[in-house]
Amino acid sequence: MTDPDFPLSKTLTRPKRPSSDYDLNPHVALPAGRTLREAAVLVATVARGNTTNLILTKRSSRLQHHPGQIAFPGGKLDPCDADIIAAALREAEEEIGLHRSSVTVLGTLPSHETVTGFLITPVLAHVTGPFTARPEAGEVEEVFEVPLSHVLSAENFAIQSRRWRGQARRYYTVPWGPYYIWGATARILRSIATEETS
């Protein structure tokens, strides 16, 4: 659905194109015939008084992949999922205790390819019912919120780099307080910020 009363609805009405962790690294040669695993993340907003916040997680430091990183709730598409939206809602319920009955889904954004071989579909949603965060101990260290206005301001983003697999890799960051938001999460947010402010 597209409802102008919900945050980020404008994003769904603009021309779209997929994004990638490689957007800032055009020198990287992608292997032909590569197979990407489908995944979904829930880009969920929640009203807090006169402000709107974005819900994010800090992944457990005990995880094998991306330990301690800031991420949207989400994960890979499972056979039990009817579609990509169902996957995002299931993962959010499992990871942070956000029940699907408390969420109004607005729609989906173009997919995002990660360097780890996932094709992520961001699912935009707004929390419209009761929600008390309950981090899943095995996967999520913390659930926190960032003012939506912060991540919709392109000026708050920076491009940094580090070496990965022997090459310099550039990526977006959008820090908030003690939280270092970077990589795929920041790239998806940067796409939204560009569309919302254009």
Image (cartoon, grey):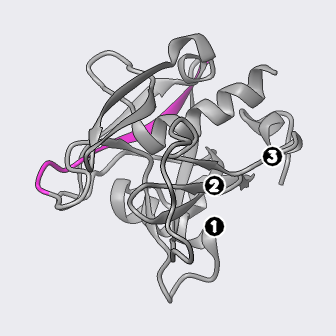
Contact? badges 2 and 1 (CB < 8 Å): yes
Kindly identify which residue carries mark 1: 85
Q: Can you give x and y, in whole percent of width and height, for residue 52 in the image?
A: 59, 25
Residue neighbourhood size for the residue with mark 1, other residues' Cα within 10 Å, grouped as few (<14), some (14–19), many (≥20): many
> Vertical placement of 12 versus 6: above or below?
below
Residue neighbourhood size for the residue with mark 2, other residues' Cα within 10 Å, grouped as few (<14), some (14–19), many (≥20): many
Taking the magenta stretch, the answer to whether it contains residue 57 is yes
Element type at mark 2 = strand
Residue neighbourhood size for the residue with mark 3, other residues' Cα within 10 Å, grouped as few (<14), some (14–19), many (≥20): few
Q: Earlier in the sequence, mark 1 or mark 3?
A: 3
| Residue at mark 1 to residue at mark 3: CA–CA distance | 18 Å
Kindly identify which residue carries mark 3: 16
Element type at mark 3 = loop
Q: Which mark is nearer the camera, 3 or 2? A: 3
Element type at mark 1 = helix
| Residue at mark 2 to residue at mark 1: CA–CA distance | 6 Å
Please, what is the three-letter code of the amino acid marked with disc 2? Val
Contact? badges 1 and 3 (CB < 8 Å): no
Q: Main secondary structure of the magenta part?
A: strand
| Residue name at image x 54 percent, y 53 percent | 42
Find the magenta span and give its range. Answer: 51-62
Which residue is farthest left? 62
| Residue name at image x 83 percent, y 54 percent | 1
Kindly identify which residue carries mark 2: 123
> Vertical placement of 188 versus 64: above or below?
above
Q: In which quadrant of the rendered view does residue 197 lie?
A: top right
Q: Earlier in the sequence, mark 3 or mark 2?
A: 3
